[in-house]
Image: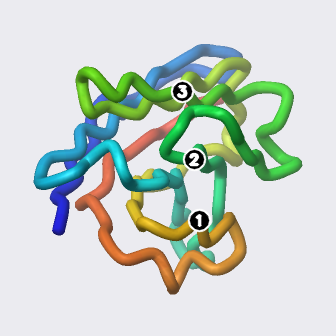
Amino acid sequence: QVQLVESGGGLVQTGGSLTLSCVISGRHADLYHIGWFRQAPGKEREGVSCIDRDDEVTYYAPSVEDRFTISRDNAKNTVYLQMNSLKEEDTAVYYCAADRRMKGLLLFNLWDYWGQGTQVTVSP
């Protein structure tokens, strides 16, 4: 079992950047694949990006593929989401999730562990 804590959210203007962090604690944290998901008010949760436990494979939603970068530092048990060229439509609560099996971005309901989320607000 692992616990996830997100940080790094905030208020930023359109075109700005933010870096989110997800700290994973618990046994064998480096054995978990990590995904980033977001949920905007009145919308369903959607997958943003995910990374395998070996830092070899990454996936991105088409809406963020050229702007966001996911990475991980297993020595620090931390996964990052670098977000550049932010748009108003990126405004959402961002969650990280962990699973020992890669579930991808579509099957978000199947990820085992979730953090509490961090708010990202992009202003005009």
Tell me the distance, in whole angstroms, between the alpha carbons under discs 3 and 2: 10 Å
Residue pushed farthest left?
Answer: 26
Of the two numbered discs 2 and 1 on the same chain, state the one appearing first in sequence. 2
Q: Is residue 7 left or right of residue 112?
A: left
Q: Is residue 23 left or right of residue 35?
A: left
Question: Which residue is disc 1 drawn over?
Answer: 102
Observer-nearest of 27 and 62: 27
Observer-nearest of 39 and 101: 101
**Disc 1 vs disc 3: which is toward the camera?**
1
Q: Is residue 23 left or right of residue 107?
A: left
Q: Residue at x 49, y 45 (%)?
A: 53
Say what amino acid the circle numbered 3 marks. Answer: Ser
Of the two numbered discs 1 and 3 on the same chain, state the one appearing first in sequence. 3
Disc 3 on helix, strand or loop?
Answer: strand
Image quadrant for the N terminus? bottom left
Observer-nearest of 94 and 56: 56
Tell me the distance, in whole angstroms, between the alpha carbons under discs 1 and 3: 16 Å
Q: Which mark is residue 52?
A: 2
Disc 2 on helix, strand or loop?
Answer: loop
Callout 3–callout 2 Cβ contact below 8 Å = no
Callout 2–callout 1 Cβ contact below 8 Å = yes
